Amino acid sequence: MKFLKKATLATAIAAAPFAANADLVALDDAVMGNTTGQAGVTIEIDIAGEGISIGEVEYIDEGSLAIENIQINNADITQTIDVDADGNLVMGVSAITDLQLSIGNTDNPTDATVASASGVMLRQAGTPANNAELVNNLSMQLDMGASTTTIYNMSAYDKVNDPDG
């Protein structure tokens, strides 16, 4: 079960950069010089319609681990990144409801490449016949609560709690 949690996390992390780069617009130096706003960054991600499709994510060492035919749909996520007055990095993620994640074959594959995709496969180096399919046709609907992660600035902490140090 731990492996599935790690595989799900790896899939979400692999998909996040694609969603974050969806509507970036270049700004020249003049525009950047006149830009003002609140402290911190807010990133809003809306994955609707066809969603995100990733053919394969593969980790290769001597053999390899492949996660194939990844689909992510129905995500509306807001992330905030800020540095507070004490120099702590504070990152927040909004609650997520009805996020749809699937790997492997779809319920009704329409072409041979999708129909032959494994969800999670172990591959032996140089020997395709010795591949082992671990998971296929995995489909999940996820609800996750809001979370905040703080990475503390320990140098600021030391000065407050140890005036001599």
Image: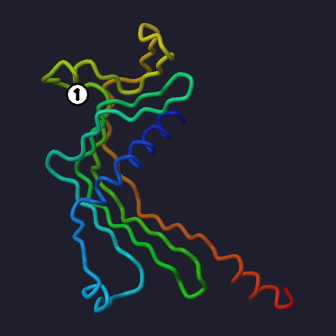
Q: Residue at x 58, y 78 (%)?
A: 88
Q: Is residue 96 above or below residue 56?
A: below
Farthest residue, direction top:
129
In the rendering, at what x and y percent does residue 125 appear? 51, 17
In this view, the residue in front, 85 or 130, is: 130
Q: Which residue is mark 1?
A: 106
Q: Is residue 137 left or right of residue 153?
A: left
In the rendering, at what x and y percent does residue 62 appear? 56, 23
Q: Is residue 136 above or below residue 92?
A: above
Q: Residue at x 36, y 27 (%)?
A: 119
Q: Residue at x 41, y 26 (%)?
A: 120
* Quarter of the figure with residue 164: bottom right
* Quarter of the figure with residue 93: bottom left
Question: What is the three-letter code of the residue carrying label 1?
Answer: Thr
Farthest residue, direction front:
29
Q: Is residue 96 left or right of residue 113?
A: right
In the rendered image, the quadrant that contains the C terminus is bottom right
In this view, the residue in front, 136 or 153, is: 153
In the rendering, at what x and y percent does residue 100 appear? 27, 44
* Quarter of the figure with residue 10: top left
Q: Residue at x 33, y 88 (%)?
A: 37
Secondary element under disc 1, as helix, strand or loop, is: loop
